[in-house]
Image (spheres, helix red, strand yellow):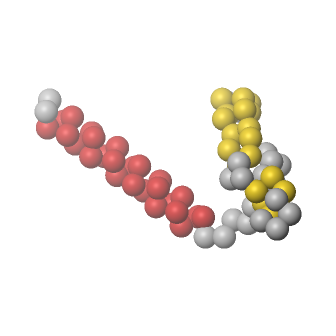
Amino acid sequence: MADALVQGNKIICNRGFGVRNLESGEPVTPSTRFRIGSITKSMTSLMLATLRLGQLRRLVRSLHG
């Protein structure tokens, strides 16, 4: 896994975790390329859940005045 912390359009910090090849033990780096696979389904679900949570929060706030 690789992650990055971005502020505006500037990368503040990026790093890799784990290994990219189990046999050789090569580490994951910030420049490691990953196959996208079915990640779009997970990301879409997360986005929809986040939007729904925001709608629920607004509804609760409006009910409690």
Residue 18 lies, in percent from the top left, at 72, 53
Residue at left 33%, top 47%?
53
Residue 27 lies, in percent from the top left, at 81, 52
Residue at left 66%, top 35%?
5
Horizontal placement of 31 versus 65: left or right?
Answer: right
Q: Residue furthest left?
A: 64
The answer to whether residue 8 is above or below residue 16 is: above
35 or 63: nearer the viewer: 35
Residue at left 74%, top 46%?
16
Residue 46 lies, in percent from the top left, at 47, 56
5 or 2: nearer the viewer: 2
Residue 15 lies, in percent from the top left, at 74, 41
Report if residue 51 is visible in the image. yes
48 or 14: nearer the viewer: 14
65 or 22: nearer the viewer: 22
Report if residue 33 is visible in the image. no
Q: Residue furthest bottom?
A: 37
Number of marks present in the image shown: 0
Residue at left 59%, top 64%?
40
- Determine the image quadrant of residue 6: top right
Horizontal placement of 27 versus 3: left or right?
Answer: right
- Determine the image quadrant of residue 59: top left
